[in-house]
Amino acid sequence: MATHKDDLDTDEVLANEEELQNALCVLAGSDPENCSYSRGYVKRQAVFACNTCTPSAAEPAGVCLACANKCHDGHDIFELYTKRNFRCDCGNSKFCDFQCHLCPVKDEENVRNHYNHNFNGCYCTCDRPYPDTDDQNDDEMIQCVVCEDWFHSRHLGCTTVEPEELQEMVCEACMNKAPFLWIYAAHFAAPPVINIGHPAEEEEEVEVDVEDEDCEPSRSGDEEPSTSTEHTKQEEAANRSSPCKRTHEEMSDSPGAAITRTVECKLKELQAQGRERLRRGAVFWPYSWRSELCTCTSCKRAYVAAEVQFLMDQSDTILAYEEKGLDEPFGQHPLMALTSSMDRVQQLEVIYGFNELKTSISAFLEQCVSEGKTVTVEAVHQFFEELRARKRRRTNAGYQ
């Protein structure tokens, strides 16, 4: 029994360390010392919102990692994970008289920034905060790689899949804004498992699991088909769907392929095969799915029109960003073991406090050496009292 408990404790420690390492690698991909504003619209960076400086939902704003800790130390800030093509707002017109300490000269507004309700602390189609003290469900949240909003798994309109196998999710709304993605989904995404229960009833699921085009989709339980026209269309689509991902070569050689490899547009080639899937619920994709997207001139124009041109960029992905962060020393910070029980804002405060302390001590000792002074107990006490006074001044200033 004791051995079993030790195994559980060990697993919990390892899980905490992995979670913290993932949290820190998100931060490691961003510059912790310099405001990112001078770099323009950064491809991807950690972004924060300050509820102390910009509490109005009408004026959402985001700040970079360095500003969150150096300009907004002691403020009520919350993490937005990462955002794509974002430029730091700290100190611009949205902050009234507040001025950025790191980069004071900025445009009044970053017109290319995209904001959503995340900047006001709300998420998902339910528009609720996270963590939500009124929500009794222990439900993880998943980020859409297109709109970058976060969704409760129960509000995705489908059953979630193992993240180790499928790395990226596109919500139903974003799929419909770029409807050509449904064609790719029929070939490369995970088979849909759709929640079809009514809101007032217990939900049941239908998993599309077809071995060939003549088979009926498998059903869980004794689900009776709906007589509605919409459901009939969905069943017809399900009867033509495929259960697994296939390579481009396999699809080109399949009996249903009506177009040869000489066709320049991959999307048209996939359309010609007639394979479809239910256009409902979020879609989960394997990490390699972006490489399957057609890059002909016509398709590139479609991506731009739907504002999803970033899907052609493999380095845009969250996974690519996090892997870069893991290669940085920040992602392997020695304080990881001490901060496993803290949230990310607290982790940042500890790490920055440690770095500031280390820098201050080095400067103090170097000054003593350069002035030929002996390091006395009284001098050390005075040094730490000055550090505490400096911290109090910053904290008080943050709440004025």
Image (cartoon, grey):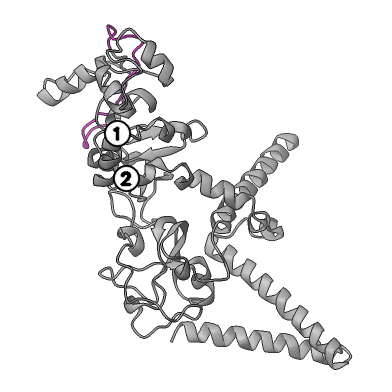
Say whether residue 8 is visible: yes
Front-lying residue, 245 or 54:
245
Name the residue tied to disc 1: 181
Element carrying mark 1: helix
What is the x, y in percent for residue 228? 11, 23
Q: Is residue 276 above or below residue 325?
A: above
Q: Provide the major secondary structure of the magenta segment.
A: loop
In the visual, does 26 lie left or right of 291?
A: right
In the rendered image, residue 212 lying in the magenta stretch gets the answer yes
Label 1 vs 2, first from the N-terminus: 1
Span colored in magenta: 195-216
Residue 332 is covered by the magenta coloring: no
Q: Residue at x 32, y 55 (%)?
A: 128
Q: Residue at x 69, y 55 (%)?
A: 337
Residue picked out by circle 2: 308
Which secondary structure lies at badge 2?
loop
Provide residue 180's location: percent of width, then percent of height.
Answer: 26, 33
Amino acid type for the residue under numbered disc 2: Val
Mark 1 crowdedness (10 Å alpha carbons): few <14, some 14-19, many ≥20: some
Would you say residue 160 is visible in this rendering? no
